[in-house]
Amino acid sequence: MLFRNDYGTTEADFLAAGKHYVPFKGTNIGMAESRDGINWEVHDKPVWEICDEEISRIYDPRLTVIDGKMHVCFAMDTRHGLRGGIAVTEDFSKFEIISLSVPDNRNMVLFPEKADGKYLRLERPMPVYSRYGAAEQFDLWASSSPDLRYWGESTPVLDAADVQFCDAKIGPGAPPVKTPYGWLTTFHAVKYSSEELYSWHLDWHKIYYAGLMLLDLDNPTKVKAICETPLIVPEKKYETEGFRGKVIFPGGMILEDSGEVKIYYGAADTVECLATADIHDLLALCGNK
C-alpha cells in the first residue's frame, strides 16, 4: 500500500488557528505491507517525495500491476497547475515518471491489461471556464495509449449529471478489477451540504460517497450497469470527523480467489479503511442477478 502523508502541522497549530486553514509543510508518499490485506506494517520512512522550484508535492497514489511491474498513478501540484502522472517502480526505492498530463487532470487509474491492443486509464479532467460557470461539475473520462507514455482518444465515460446521488463532481476510485461480466470499478461522487461539515479549515460543505459501476469487458469506455445508490456513505465517526469530514474515497480493490472483494477507502481524508463484500453481491448491485 502506498499512501499520502501530509506533514509539518501540529494539533497545537490547528487549535491556535481556530479551525482556519493551516498549511502543512510538505507531502510525501508512505508505504505499508501486509500478508493478509488486513494487518499492515508501515515503513518508518517515506518512499517518495518531490519538492523543487516547479513541483510543490506529489500525492494520491493508485497502484496497478501491468506486465509484472508496479505502475503508480499520482497527482502533482506544480507552479503551472495540477497535473496527473504515471510512474513505474520495481522495488519502491526508485520511481521513473513516464507520463505527465497538462493541467488540469487527476484521479487517474490504470486498467491492469490492454483493451483492443491499447492501454487504458480512467481520469477526471477539471474544466471550469467551458462549463458556463458550473462549479466543479466534473465528469469521468477515459484515455488510451499504445505505450503508457502518450495518451489520447479521450472520451467521456460517465457524466456527473447521470449519478443520482451527486450534484457536483465525480471521478475514478480504485483501479478496475476484471470479472466475467465486465470491469467492476468504484468511483467517487460529491454532493453539497447546506451545513458546514467537520474540517480543520472553514467552509467545508462537500460529502463524498463511493459509487460502483460495471464497464463493458470489450469496450471499457462503455458503462454496462451502475449501482443507483451509494456503495459506501460516511456514517461512522472516523468517516465524519477528521481532516475533512464526511469523505469516503475508494482507492484500492482486490478480488480474491475466494470471491471476496477487499475495498480500501480513505475516510475523512485521515485514515485508511477496509470494507469487504462478496463479488456476486456487488455484481447484483449493478444488475447482474
Image: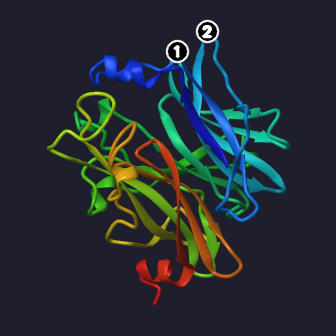
Identity of the residue furthest to the top in this view = 53
Disc 1 residue type? Arg
Residue situated in front as seen by the camera: 118 or 196: 196
- Which label sits on residue 20? none
Residue 219 appears in the rendering? no
Residue situated in front as seen by the camera: 28 or 240: 240
Residue ID for mark 1: 79
The x, y position of residue 34, in whole percent, is: 73, 57
Residue situated in front as seen by the camera: 148 or 192: 192
SS under mark 1: loop
Q: Quadrant of residue 253?
A: bottom right
The x, y position of residue 144, in whole percent, is: 63, 51
Disc 2 residue type? Glu
Identity of the residue furthest to the left in this view = 194
The answer to whether 85 is drawn above or below residue 188 in the figure is above
Q: Residue at x 19, y 46 (%)?
A: 193
Q: Earlier in the sequence, mark 2 or mark 1?
A: 2
Q: Do the residues labelled 2 and 1 touch (CB within 8 Å)?
A: yes
Q: Is residue 257 left or right of residue 264?
A: right
Q: In this view, does 233 lie to the left or right of 135?
A: right
Residue ID for mark 2: 53
SS under mark 2: loop
The x, y position of residue 202, in whole percent, is: 25, 28
Q: Which colour scheme is used?
A: rainbow
Crowding near the residue tagged with mark 2, few <14, some 14–19, many ≥20 C-alpha atoms within 10 Å: few
Label 2, label 1: how far apart the Cα atoms are = 8 Å
Q: Which residue is drawn at 33% across and 49% down?
A: 240
